Image: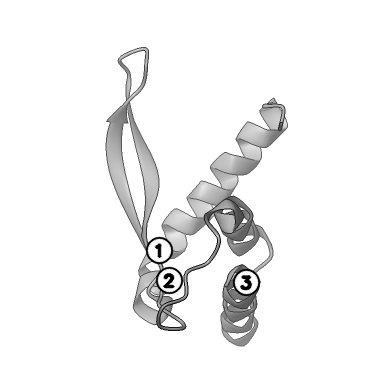
Amino acid sequence: TVKVSKTNIDLARQATTCLAEKAPMLEEYFSIKFEKRQVQTVQKKAIRTLFLTGLPVLLDGHSPQPHALPIFLLRLATEVNWKEEQPCFEGICRELASFY
């Protein structure tokens, strides 16, 4: 069990912000699709959140393990060099390969 702490929450927010900013490129080049949606919390507060809505089909009939999805998304946000084009594409490919 992972204990929820301020550090975990901050990391999740930073990763979500990164993926939201990179969503158009991830969809165009890698078929990784995200949608921003408004949801209502238990306290009846409306918040905008990011949902993963699509992944690429890399091998017909094969799907990655669902339990690996959180670490894939975290590594996609934190381990990819988003500042330079070639290392960025290589990093995304590396994370996709590890996930699949």
Q: Amino acid at mark 1?
A: Ala
Residue farthest top in this picture = 43
Query: Which residue bears the numbered disc 1?
Result: 23
**Helix, strand, or loop for circle 2?**
helix
| Tag 1–tag 2 contact (CB < 8 Å) | yes
Q: Is residue 77 left or right of residue 39?
A: right
Query: Which residue bears the numbered disc 3?
Result: 95
Q: In x, y percent, where is residue 88?
A: 60, 78
Mark 1 → mark 3, Cα distance in angstroms: 16 Å
- Residue at 58% x, 52% y: name it: 67
Q: Residues within 10 Å of mark 2 (few under 14, many from 20)?
A: some
Query: Disc 1 or 3, which lies upstream in sequence?
Result: 1
Mark 2 → mark 3, Cα distance in angstroms: 12 Å
Q: In x, y percent, where is residue 56?
A: 41, 75
Q: Amino acid at mark 2?
A: Leu
Mark 1 → mark 2, Cα distance in angstroms: 5 Å
